[in-house]
Amino acid sequence: MDMKRAIIFLLVIIGLQANCQVINDINLSSGISISKTDWSDKMYNKAIIGYSTSFVVGYLEHNCWEINSKIGFYQIGGKEKIDFADESGNIIDKGTARFYFNYFNFNTTFKVKYRFDKFEPYLCFGPRIDWLASSTYSSIYLSNHKSFKDFNYGLDIKGGTAFFADERFFLSGNIGYSKSFMDIADYVKPKGNIIIEVGLGYKLKK
């Protein structure tokens, strides 16, 4: 497992360094992250919607493919319906407890694309690493949860299309799936997350 982690980390770093060479395009996107986590106490296992944003650099372009490197931010987590009771145990209100893990995300992907007219559909896949920046919760009962792992790694795959308004500027839309290879903690397992984003890009080279 350590060797697998080291190989993925090395591939991501190589990609991030390579983007300093022949940069083809840049893209800033934002959207939502739909995720689910598996807690051992089964309390926060329902799917939740969080935020996602990314800055992508494309380089080493060929006719039908290029390499992309991304730095971004996304949220995963879970939620659960809870009851509020008074001192006598009588339920006086209901609410929803939410827990978010806030990650900075770095990846390098291989992008296959095909341009026709003003449209360019594409498919990307590659390794990624995540750094846990913080965790946020909406219930005091969650404040006792600790020992989350600072880093995670996994695989990203996404498909989408770009619409070129002219030879330089383009709009993009994509949907992707992220699979993590590590648990968040001994008692929390990520179940994968779907990311939907739209963005604005600029092509540096015609």
Image: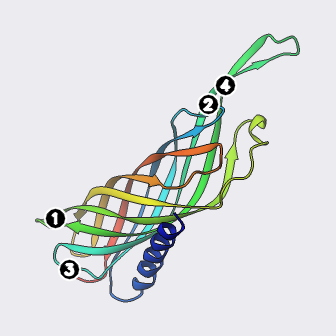
Mark 2 crowd level (few <14, some 14–19, many ≥20, 10 Å Cα):
few
Mark 4 vs mark 1: which is more N-terminal? 4
> Where is 64 relative to 123, above or below?
below
Q: Quadrant of residue 161?
A: bottom left
Q: Nearer the viewer, mark 1 or mark 2?
A: 2
Mark 2 vs mark 4: which is more N-terminal? 2
Q: Which residue is mark 4?
A: 95
Q: Quadrant of residue 58?
A: bottom left
Real-space Cα distance between discs 4 and 1?
Answer: 48 Å
Real-space Cα distance between discs 1 and 2?
Answer: 48 Å
Q: Nearer the viewer, residue 57 or 8?
A: 8
Q: Identify residue type, mark 4.
A: Gly
Mark 3 crowd level (few <14, some 14–19, many ≥20, 10 Å Cα):
few
Quadrant the C terminus occupies: bottom left
Q: Nearer the viewer, mark 4 or mark 1?
A: 4
Residue 4: x, y in percent?
47, 67
Real-space Cα distance between discs 2 and 4?
Answer: 17 Å
Real-space Cα distance between discs 1 and 3?
Answer: 18 Å
Label annotation for residue 62: 3
Q: Identify residue type, mark 1.
A: Lys
Check whether the beta carbons of the residues at disc 1 and disc 3 lie within 8 A of each other: no
Q: Identify residue type, mark 2.
A: Lys
Label annotation for residue 167: none
Q: List the single residue furthest toward the bottom.
A: 21
Q: Nearer the viewer, mark 2 or mark 4?
A: 2
Check whether the beta carbons of the residues at disc 4 and disc 1 lie within 8 A of each other: no
Label annotation for residue 118: 1
Q: Identify residue type, mark 3.
A: His
